[in-house]
Image (cartoon, coloured by chain):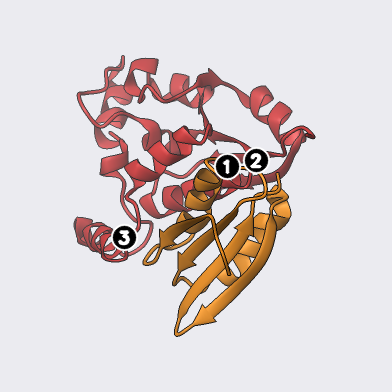
Chain colours: A red, B orange
Amino acid sequence: MAAKERVTLVVFSGELDKALAAFNIAIGAASMGMEVSMFFTFWGLNVIKRNEGGIKSKGIMRRMLNFMNRGGSKRLHLSRFRMLGMGTWMMKQLMKDVNFPQLEELMAMAKGMGVKFIACTTSMGMMGISKEAFIPEVDSFAGVATYLADAKEGKVNLFI
Amino acid sequence: MKADATLDCIGLYCPMPIYHTANKLKELEMGQVLEILADDEGIKEDMPAWCRTTGNELLGIEEEAGKYKAYVKKSN
């Protein structure tokens, strides 16, 4: 069999709807036998932060940022109609109504299909987020060269 | 059409039907046929696309009253 076709997704956004779209594509691609890498950077890091506990960081600005930008799959909001959380809650209800998996379930499915989760170390350093802030499913911590080396061989490369 | 196994994806939206199809097909032997039941219209385009990409053979899709039956022969 020929080498697997590669798909890379840059998850830059930290919003629930965009994360859902990213994982939909990742699961679809993995189901089609493709090798998928998801690079989480900037606000996208919020998607793969663990939901429990606090996030430690040094310096007043980084502490403030991580307090206001806590992240974690359960804390994400919609990019539109957030309505102080009401909109997000309603969208989750609508997903349940049509038996569509919640983000955490999609992430588990993607992981089960061998999708690679990669966290951007530049964003981590700048924002003061340590490795301990992330879920254990994260495969590696890397930079743009890792992304580009994968994307160069990718048939589908998306920035979300 | 005769099938060796059936996968019920009624009530599930994209990408769940192809996700479950990919996983279920792993349990089947080469040449066996999987029947997929679905009611998301997207399957009419998605299952042929999935088969084209994965190298499995689509034997046909039957449509009846908003429900679809797709038949996939494991060929890869």
Q: CA distance from mark 2 to mark 1?
A: 5 Å
Residue A114 versus residue B51: which sits nearer the camera?
B51
Mark earlier in primary sequence (2, 3): 2
Q: Position of residue A10 (x, y in %)?
A: 57, 39
Residue A127 appears left or right of A96: right
Task: Evaluate whether label 1 is on the same chain as label 3.
Answer: yes
Q: Chain of mark 3?
A: A
Number of marks drawn: 3
The amino acid type, in three-letter code, at marker 3 is Asn
**Residue bearing mark 3:** A99
Q: Residue at x 31, y 51 (%)?
A: A77
The disc label shown at residue A2, or none:
none
Cα separation, mark 1 vs mark 3, equals: 21 Å
Q: Are marks 2 and 1 in contact (CB under 8 Å)?
A: yes
Q: Quadrant of the C terminus of chain B?
A: top right
Q: Which residue is labeled 1 in the image?
A: A30
The chain under label 2 reads A
**Quarter assignment of residue A147:** top right
* Nearer to the camera, B35 or A121: B35
For the point 51% across and 44% down, the residue is: B23
